[in-house]
Image: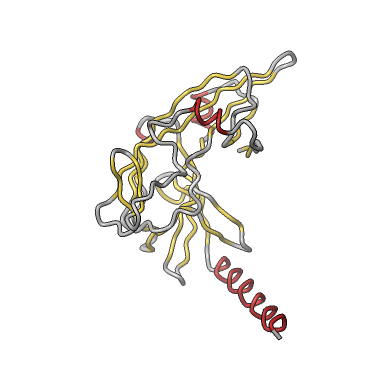
Amino acid sequence: MKKIIAIPLLIVVVFSFASCCLFYDYECNATDNFDIGYSKLLNQAFLSDYNWDGTEKGMNIVIPEEYKKIPVTAFGGYFGRGVPCSFGILLTDEAKELLSPNATGWYFTSNISTHENYEIKYLNFNVHISSNISEMEGLWLDRYIVAKHKNDTSTSYEIYVPLCNVTCDEDNKTFYAKDGKLYFKGNDQLVTDIMYEDFDVGKDIESKKDKIVSCHPF
């Protein structure tokens, strides 16, 4: 009897999830260099990516309160037929040209322990969290940005570390910021999916030596 009940329940859950996804539209560079998914029906919007243009001004990232009068409540979400979206800092073609015009490829990775012949470079961003943000399950600010240089005889890398100094709107009911870091109000727990200004690359490499390396081209 339990199996008979469980199957219809699973079907309901799956279709409910799919239906919610279909309610969301998606726009690239919707506003202030942000990619945004939004639903007028559900009155919710989420941030997918921030497209940094390589300018110093663009390194000050202010999370919008709303889009098309719809509250922006989350980092990451789903749209269409369940397409997942995470929030991270992407580079526009202009930014790639400024940082490393001769790169033969670009990708994200959370693990650089297997890389050799590389140079570490730092990018310093200021990120202001708006009052409406309440979910961060799709946060992706803990990834290295890698420019690959490959020729007939060798391969080298420029590894960019996007360090973040975080501030938060005082009216946010879920999060608060202190000393450039973001915390949950409910339990004072640090939001860990962010490379803060004191991020230690050496310690990170050491801690991930035995872990799987995955790369995400962009």
| Residue at point 30%, 50% (across, down) | 176
Question: What colour scheme was applied to this rendering of the protein?
Answer: secondary structure
| Residue at point 44%, 26% (across, down) | 122
Q: For the image shown, how many numbered marks are present on the structure? A: 0
Q: Position of residue 215 (x, y in %)?
A: 64, 37
| Quadrant in the picture for residue 159 | top right
Q: Which of 9 and 210 is in front in this view?
A: 210
| Residue at point 55%, 59% (across, down) | 78
| Quadrant in the picture for residue 152 | top right
**Up/down of 164 relative to 168, above or below:** above
**Up/down of 137 relative to 102, above or below:** below
Report the quarter where the N terminus lies.
Answer: bottom right
Residue lying farthest to the bottom in this orientation: 1
| Residue at point 42%, 33% (across, down) | 163
Q: Where is residue 132 in the image (x, y as percent from the top left)?
A: 34, 58
Q: Position of residue 14 (x, y in %)?
A: 64, 71
Q: Position of residue 49 (x, y in %)?
A: 49, 46
Residue lying farthest to the right in this orientation: 152
**Up/down of 11 relative to 115, above or below:** below
Report the quarter where the C terminus lies.
Answer: top right
Residue lying farthest to the top in this orientation: 153
Q: Nearer the viewer, residue 156 or 22?
A: 156
